[in-house]
Amino acid sequence: MAAEEVARIRNIAIVGQGGVGKTLLADALVLAAGSATRLGRSDDGTSLFDIEPEEVRRKTSITTAIHHVPWRKHEITILDTPGYAAFLAETRAALTAASGAVFVLSPHGEVKVELERVWSWCRALGIPSIAYMTRLDREETDLDEALAPVARVVDAKVIPIAIPIGSTTGLEGYVDLVAMRSMTAASDFAAPQSGAIASGSQAAVAAHRDRLLEAVAEVDDALLEHYLESGELAEDEIRRGLRLGVLAGKLLPVLVGTPARGIGVHAVLDAAVDLLGSPADLPEMEAVDAKSGQPVARPADPGAPFAALVFKTVNDPFAGKLSLFRVVSGRASSDSTVLNASRGAKERLGQLLRLEGKKQAPIGVAMAGEICAVAKLKDTASGDTLADEKAPVLLPKLPTFEAVMSFAAQPKSKADEEKATQSLQKMMEEDLALHIERDPESREIIVSGSGQLHIEVVVERLKRKYGVEVELKAPKVPYRETIKGRAEAQGKLKKQSGGRGQFADTWIKLEPLPRGAGFEFVDEIVGGAIPRQYIPAVEKGIREAMPRGILTGSPVVDFKVTLFDGSYHDVDSSEMAFKIAASLGFKDALAKARPVLLEPIMLLEVTVPDECMGDVIGDLNARRGRVLGVDPKPPHQVIRAEVPMAEVLKYAPDLRSMTSGRGDFHMAFAHYDEVPAHLSDKVIKEVRAERGIAAAGE
């Protein structure tokens, strides 16, 4: 492929909210392009894009799947992306490889936060987009009414370039508003044939045509001048204006149809060629020179130095690791050596592969703009940059995703504990929304992700791919203990049973510090009551006792210890003795200083539709939350609140239920605060029982 042929590449991401039929459209595009002999369907497990067994079983996309098709002497790579919030990290990564996007829209007219988020990503990445209103054979649909909610949330003019002929089971085809012809087919998936527009629909067609002409004319001054003079635009002028508007992000043209019958599917392929950009039409990718640190740009030019971004990793216990990358500039060749500029390590590229759904086809060279894969790179992970050793650059890394829900994963077999940790770490390489850590207090394996469904899928994969079964439990809340009063106590150790004994005597004073101040140790020993060499042992004894308080066994924080008196023995005193004595005195003083339990408070930012705001605020109040403010973000409201962690461990499904899936939230640790007095005893009993700690006096 010569340099000028980069213009023939189209990498189109099929995007939108969950449940609207994106995968069915992707399968229909492959069939319409002649790269399949039958229509694949998720419903019967035959889709070319449902790669993972979990996807086949759940009949929903979990990962991005890729298939290549030729169309009108262009090479189109289709990226079918997930639409449910739990798996949008996959979609965001796939967009870094896309040069265009097709938004699949629901005829119900509802818009969920997933569509808004993907639209904002496309805008930030400069990805031109079109839309396809699907499933028009299922129910009566008013096109304008269905598109109105979309128009309220995207910052481009939503303009139909086709309208349906017929409706529900009587859907026959569509009117092409650009060519002003009816497009119908003799049978499902047959190429549509052009015909005259029926006289009964000409009024509706004329109204939509006028809106199309106005929208196109506003894109370009020359077009606007011609339109104002003549009141009309030629077909080639409309197509030129549509392309300009799409590439500039000013227009979102909408096609219509139903993928199950192939209606409007050929038009999507045509629009991908005519309206969506090639990699060369996108802005040059900004990068950083790996040697000098200076900003540089990498154009989609096969003659430029090689640079590629790894946007997806697939780990298989038997086949090994497969790295998917988009060649940003230059060219990649099979059996060549490149530099992983992100890690400073050389990598050997073996056989390059083109992805064809569940299959792979070997290729020798991948040019700028193309998407390909390679197996068994040793040191490469998602987000890494592969580059020419002589001109290394660092491309923008993939974004990280906050976890919105966490579970403790308990292996069913004790022997699988280490294997579970190692396997989950491997899964993190291919799942950007998955976070794994070992809780330093509880020693639990904490699995965090973008929702309960996400984590359940992780557990299923863990069993299928690595043979490790785990049970999910709510993670232990990391409580803390502190004091509200002052106290003095003696810590004394005296053991003499023949031979050298152990003796240490300490007097300490315990005082509270402001929240978040930590621990402070003050030495006020005078007159040599305790020799200087033993003072550090006193502090060490207290520090070693701090991690286990007397209420729930939680770490003790925000207090000051003053060592003000004591005594020693010339022979029997030692550092160990003073360390033990100090810990005894600390526990005694702690019990006298009005100990209280602290709980972590989280800062929540909840984005909800206007009509759901009252319900969500009421729910936050019921969770002991404190609303800090509400900021308008039409047609949504952003609620800022502080809520105890214990009350929001499973907030994601509750918010989804309250907002019909249109709500979204981000959560971060804010500070620790005292558990309210009326709940303290109950919480302490529950935590002690959970941790197997006996109550005082037992």
Image: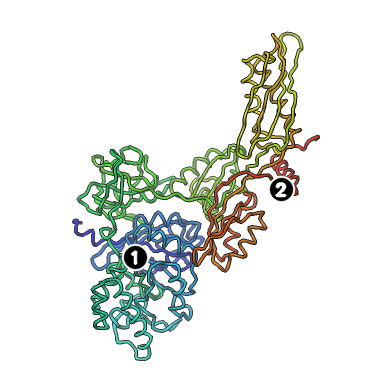
Query: Which residue is drawn at the image coordinates 60% and 36% (left, top)?
Result: 517
Q: Which mark is residue 249?
A: 1
Name the amino acid, label 2. Pro
* Residue 176 vs residue 191, the one in the foreground: 176
Name the amino acid, label 1. Gly
* Residue 240 vs residue 440, the one in the foreground: 240
Residue 40 at x, y percent in the picture: 41, 67
Q: Which mark is residue 676?
A: 2
Where 400 sits versus 69, above or below? Answer: above
* Residue 251 vs residue 424, the one in the foreground: 251
Q: Quadrant of residue 200?
A: bottom left
Q: Which mark is residue 678?
A: none
Is any atom of residue 518 visible in this view? yes
Residue 394 at x, y percent in the picture: 32, 44
What secondary structure is marked by label 2?
A: loop
What secondary structure is marked by label 1?
A: loop
Residue at the extreme right? 697
Query: Which residue is drawn at the image coordinates 56% and 66% (left, top)?
Result: 660
Residue 475 at x, y percent in the picture: 61, 46
Q: Earlier in the sequence, mark 2 or mark 1?
A: 1
**Quadrant of the drawing holding the N terminus:** bottom left
* Residue 632 vs residue 319, the one in the foreground: 632
The image's colouring method is rainbow
Is any atom of residue 349 visible in this view? no
